[in-house]
Amino acid sequence: MHLIKYYFLFAVGLFLLVRCSSALYMPVAADEVISGNSLDSLITGRNLYISKCASCHSLYLPKQYTLHQWEINVEEMEEKAKLNSTQKELIFNYLVLNCKTD
């Protein structure tokens, strides 16, 4: 019975991860100019956000928070998500690319 429950919870979690990640903004070439970051680094930041953050909680869309709020959120989650400084910067740069304006 525990095995069935485990598989069910895993399936639900996987479904939510896929559902939420598809709703996240996907950076495009024009974002390089806007952000000053390469398209590859913005996509890497998105992928890190999905892989590092969705393992513990639902993903928030970048537009849900302002730049300042993302700054606080990412800082608070750095240790919990076991982010190194490069990963933290990549995730932050992705999130603020399409964040809520003040």
Image (cartoon, rainbow, N blue to C red):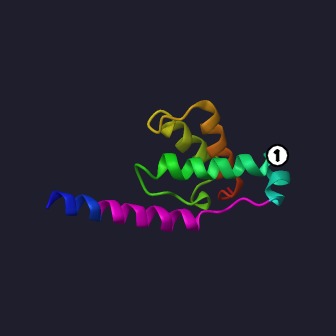
Res. 99 image quadrant = bottom right
Res. 10 image quadrant = bottom left
Percent position of residue 36, x then y: 82, 46
- Residue 17, relative to residue 42: is it above or below? below
Name the residue type under label 1. Gly
Percent position of residue 64, x then y: 57, 60
The residue depicted at 53 percent of the width and 35 percent of the height is 83
- Residue 85, relative to residue 73: is it above or below? above
Residue at which label 1 appears: 36
Residue that sits furthest to the right in the current view: 33
Q: Which residues are magenta?
A: 9-28
Percent position of residue 101, x then y: 69, 58
Q: Quadrant of the N terminus?
A: bottom left
Q: Is residue 64 left or right of residue 8?
A: right
**Residue 20 is one of the magenta-drawn residues:** yes
Kindly state the secondary structure of the residue where label 1 is placed. loop
Q: Main secondary structure of the magenta part?
A: helix
**Residue 13 is one of the magenta-drawn residues:** yes
Q: Is residue 89 left or right of residue 7?
A: right
